Image: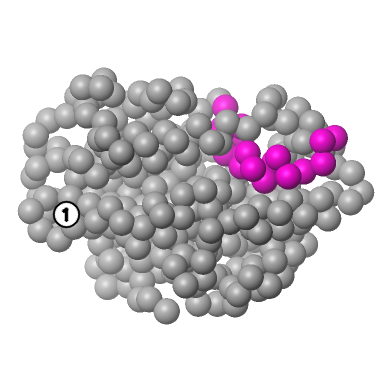
């Protein structure tokens, strides 16, 4: 796979941004792509970052506008990623890591909706899910952007450890869905995924028309998808969670069915597959901020 240089992407890089030791947040506004619309990208470096020192793992995160500053967030709240990651590194609970934030666009729902899981739904349900988002999934092109353009750029310009055992992906809600999908579609790229408040309903909560057997349909679609998947409990790490309030209150029947599907394929809950319920937590950046350390330790802490 060819690397994509800064000139190709229309980016301006100063030598100090990528060659000097030390941490900080680097912004790449309107990062260009041949597959999807341009979007802002951020690269956060830990204080210990040294371009001539240890190669670091990389965590790719969706909804990048919500990660650091409330002024950039669509909801007015943020995950506090820099604060939590820095604390966990300092306390030696996780390895030093580079965090790449990928901002969403107005096509967020379609870009984060897993195409092949969507494709395994009955036709009428596919139509309803697509209508709820204003069109069919664009997730395959979104993942091509990450894997074929963004990751090569990051690996070229930063001192990364590029293999799957050091490359992870994380998101919440629909971002959780596309995180799991990214790992499933590219198991030789992403060794671990974390999906907070994974949006099992697939469609937009505001517009989705659900038939009475919707749970069974979604479960069957995930079953079909997992049957063809190359995910392996010996090679990959998968984390899912949910709260019990607001939108998260609807998720437990779906995650419970998913646990059964995973167990049938050799993934015992705990260890390399984790499914957690956070009592009283709602569907918000504040809630994801409060439990962010849990998936970070799962992906970047001591191995089980």
Q: Verify whether residue 292 appears in magenta.
A: no
- Is 117 rendered above or below residue 90? above
Residue 261 shows in this picture: yes
Image location of residue 190, percent across then percent down: 42, 54
Location of the N terminus by quadrant is top left
Question: What residue is drawn where x is 47% and y is 66%?
Answer: 237
Magenta stretch secondary structure, dominant: helix
Image location of residue 88, percent across then percent down: 32, 67
Image location of residue 210, percent across then percent down: 85, 42
Q: Is residue 132 left or right of residue 159?
A: right
Q: Is residue 264 left or right of residue 191?
A: right
Q: Is residue 153 left or right of residue 117?
A: left
Q: Is residue 55 left or right of residue 61?
A: left
- Is 270 rendered above or below residue 222? below
Question: What residue is drawn where x is 55% and y is 25%?
Answer: 106
Q: Residues within 10 Å of mark 1 (few under 14, many from 20)?
A: many
Q: Which residue is mark 1?
A: 49
Question: What residue is drawn where x is 54% and y is 36%?
Answer: 140
Q: Secondary structure at mark 1?
A: loop
Task: Check the image and tell me how it is coloured.
Answer: one colour
- Is 24 rendered above or below residue 256? above
- Which stretch is magenta? 107-124
Q: Could you say which is closer to the camera, residue 52 or residue 236?
A: 236
Q: Could you say which is closer to the camera, residue 267 or residue 168?
A: 267
Residue 69 shows in this picture: no
Image location of residue 163, percent across then percent down: 31, 56
Q: Verify whether residue 120 appears in magenta.
A: yes
- Is 235 rendered above or below residue 131? below
Location of the C terminus by quadrant is bottom left
């Amino acid at each position: 796979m060819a690397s994509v240089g800064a000139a190709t992407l229309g980016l301006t890089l100063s030598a100090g941004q990528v060659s000097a030791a030390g941490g900080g947040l680097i912004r790449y506004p309107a990062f260009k792509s041949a597959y999807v619309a341009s979007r802002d990208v951020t690269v956060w470096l830990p204080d210990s970052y040294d371009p001539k020192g240890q190669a670091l793992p990389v965590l790719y995160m969706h909804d990048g506008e919500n990660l650091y500053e409330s002024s950039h967030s669509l909801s007015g709240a943020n995950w506090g990623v820099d604060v939590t990651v820095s604390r966990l590194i300092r306390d030696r609970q996780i390895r030093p890591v580079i965090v790449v934030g990928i901002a969403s666009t107005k096509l967020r729902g379609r870009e984060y909706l897993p195409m092949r899981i969507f494709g395994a739904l009955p036709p009428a349900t596919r139509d309803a899910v697509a209508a709820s988002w204003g069109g069919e999934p664009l997730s395959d092109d979104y993942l091509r952007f990450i894997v074929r353009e963004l990751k090569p750029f990051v690996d070229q310009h930063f001192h990364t450890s590029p293999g799957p055992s050091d490359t992870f992906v994380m998101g919440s809600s629909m971002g959780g869905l596309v995180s799991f999908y990214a790992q499933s579609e590219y198991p030789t790229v992403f060794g671990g995924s974390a999906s907070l408040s994974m949006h099992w309903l697939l469609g937009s909560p505001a517009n989705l028309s659900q038939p009475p057997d919707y749970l069974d349909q979604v479960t069957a679609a995930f079953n079909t998808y997992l049957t063809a998947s190359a995910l392996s409990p010996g090679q990959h790490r998968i984390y899912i969670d949910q709260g019990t309030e607001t939108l998260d209150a609807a998720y437990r029947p779906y995650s419970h069915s998913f646990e059964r599907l995973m167990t049938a394929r050799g993934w015992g809950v705990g260890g390399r597959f984790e499914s957690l319920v956070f009592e009283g937590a709602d569907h918000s950046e504040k809630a994801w901020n409060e439990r962010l350390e849990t998936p970070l330790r799962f992906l970047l802490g001591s191995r089980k």
